[in-house]
Amino acid sequence: MENLENAIVEIKEKMPGLKLLENEPMSSHCSFRIGGPVRALAAPKDVTGLSKLCHLLKTHHISPLLLGNGTNILFPDEGLKDLFIISTENLTKMFLLPDGAIYAEAGVSLAKLASFAQQNGLAGLEFASGIPGTVGGGVRMNAGAYGGELKDAVDVKADIGLTDADLAGQYQYTKDIVTVDGSQRGTTWQATPGLFAYRRSIFQQMNAAILSAVFRLQPGDKAEISAKMRELNERRRDKQPLDMPSAGSAFKRPEGHYAAELIEEVGLKGYSVGGAQVSEKHSGFVVNTGGATSHDVYDLMMHVRNTVYKERGVFLEPEIIILPPEYALVDEGPDLKLNSVQVNDISRPPEPPKEG
């Protein structure tokens, strides 16, 4: 705690223009509308400011949490007095590169990214138009829906100069990573088949954050892309409880099953603990019906997980990030591996590519 207090004093002295909120309730910064105060939340105005802030925190041995829209996270009611959060809300640059790829910073919403792609006649991100997250968090967790995943669109081949031979049999690429512990590292990862998995990436294991990504898509008809986006969004509105606070899908899809179907089969659709409820519209969602606490959500998810395992023998892994980490319901599964990696230690992240 003393290190954190000293860090805050220095940040105020050296970054006077920084948006810095102290003892900020996280119920105002997440889609669940649940969570007590964290010691501080800062919102740097750009990547350079974020780099400087991380450097200052590192000198005090502080590991911050980077936060996008907070759409898949559960903060504790008691708050986290030793947590410093960095919001990516101001990292919203997005533009076409000369080769037609899309450059987007971490704070760009996936909905805006998908819309920008449609406006430029680029197909491949239609599935993302209704995902309520941002580029940073989305790439980090390999967000997806309706058969699409971000790993299929992310690419920085041109930025790191690899050849087609280098790419043989491999996925595409993501770039511009700074470790969350504050070390100033501009990291370019080569994305191998072990980099991404279902709703997971190696960036989670490395405790790394995505600052930006390049999306390489396929040319498409604007009207057809728009129609596909409308179709998927209508399906979401029809099937998902979008009118209630939640953190999206509560559990990942277990292999060979659907979490919502399993939950319904064991009779837990509509089941409640306090103000938390298994949605009556979609059993894969846990919703805040009003006044739910983090303990309500946690206890409900524990009950669902244990009941499904007892009656169906299937282990449900949470898709929601539960804080603090020691409250996590399950282990993260087998390690993901990199076949190769390129790391460049630098004092600040690289400048984004120039438009046009």
Image (cartoon, rainbow, N blue to C red):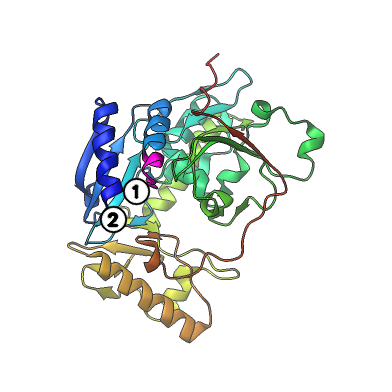
Along the line of sight, which residue is nearer the eye, 52 or 166?
52
Describe residue 195's horizontal placement relative to residue 86 as left or right.
right
Q: Among all residues in the image, which is located at the extreme right?
A: 165
Q: Please report contact status of discs 2 and 1: CB closer than 8 Å, yes or no.
A: yes
| Residue located beneath label 2 in the image | 32
Q: Residues within 10 Å of mark 1 (few under 14, many from 20)?
A: many
From the top left corner, tell me how far across and down residue 41 is, in percent: 27, 42
Q: Is residue 130 magenta?
A: no
First along the sequence among labels 2 and 1:
2
Q: Is residue 64 magenta?
A: yes
| Residue located beneath label 1 in the image | 70
Describe residue 89's horizontal placement relative to residue 309 as left or right.
left
Quadrant of the image for the C terminus?
top right
Describe residue 45's horizontal placement relative to residue 289 as left or right.
right
Q: Under tag 2, what secondary structure?
A: loop
Q: Amino acid under label 2?
A: Phe
Residue at horizontal 35%, vertical 60%? 323
Is residue 230 in view?
Answer: no
Find the magenta span and give its range.
57-65
Residue at horizontal 62%, vertical 43%? 152
From the top left corner, tell me how far across and down residue 282 is, in percent: 38, 64
Is residue 258 in view?
Answer: yes
Is the residue 325 above or below the residue 140 in the image? below
Along the line of sight, which residue is nearer the eye, 319 or 114?
319
Q: Amino acid under label 1?
A: Gly
Is the residue 84 above or below the residue 47 in the image? below
Which numbered tag is attached to residue 317?
Answer: none
